[in-house]
Image (cartoon, helix red, strand yellow):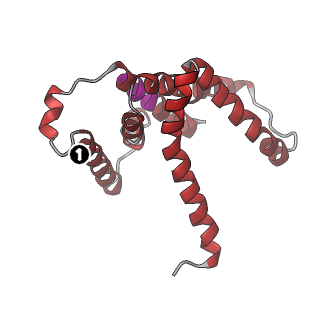
Amino acid sequence: MILRGNMLSYLMLICATVSWGGAFVAAKVVVGELHPLVAATGRFWLAFFCLLPFMLWKERGKAKVALKDWPILIFLGLTGVFLYNVLFFKGLQISAAMDGSLLVACGPVFTVVLSGIILKERINIRQALGFIISLTGVIVIVTKGHPASLVGWDLNPGDIMLTISVLAWSLYSIGGKIA
């Protein structure tokens, strides 16, 4: 039985999932009307202006950035804001929204693998099982249950851009651990 106190948490999780799922279809519609760079810039500014009041309220003037933190902040902005968004929108301009959602679903897998390589983090058994299950699911969906079709799979430029956007997001996530 779901406790009343948990109901808000579950509702918020459902809203997050619906928002993430809808982002691919919405982005596909947006790039039909706007250049991907304009769409990415608009997405950034919309998020900035929505989050700014919360930051000002929460930090109350204490949000100052030390000079030594600027290199990592620039790296985070380049990978997680600029590269991810521009390649996401440009990739969806060429590829199907479903392709984008499947490729972005590989993000946690890329992040775990890159964290192991870059940060020397150990991958535990649960992460390895999650990695295998996630990758298997993507392969089954992409190949429609025929993994042998990957041998002759023709990636279009949009899929490559979406994959690079996922790698950029993974690097952003790893950079966040460093910061």
Q: Percent position (x, y) of residue 92? A: 45, 27
Q: Is residue 10 above or below residue 94?
A: below
Residue beneath disc 1: 140
Magenta residues, dominant SS class:
helix
Relative horizontal placement of residue 139, taking residue 164 as reference (left or right): left
Picture coordinates of residue 12 (x, y %)? 60, 59
| Kind of element beneath mark 1 | helix
Q: Residue at x 54, y 77 (%)?
A: 2
- For this orientation, the residue located farthest to the bottom is 1
Left-right relation of 59 to 138: right
Which amino acid type is marked by label 1? Val
Q: Residue at x 59, y 79 (%)?
A: 3
- Residue placed most toward the observer, 122 or 171: 171
Residue at left offset 40%, top offset 42%: 105
Above or below — where is 18 with respect to 99?
A: below
Q: What percent of the width, then of the height, locates residue 80?
A: 56, 30
Name the residue at 81% across, 42% down: 53
Which of these two is toward me, 62 or 56? 56
Note whether 131 is above or below 26 in the view shown: below
- Classify the position of the C terminus by image quarter: top right
Magenta span of residues: 160-167
Q: Nearer the viewer, residue 4 or 21?
A: 21
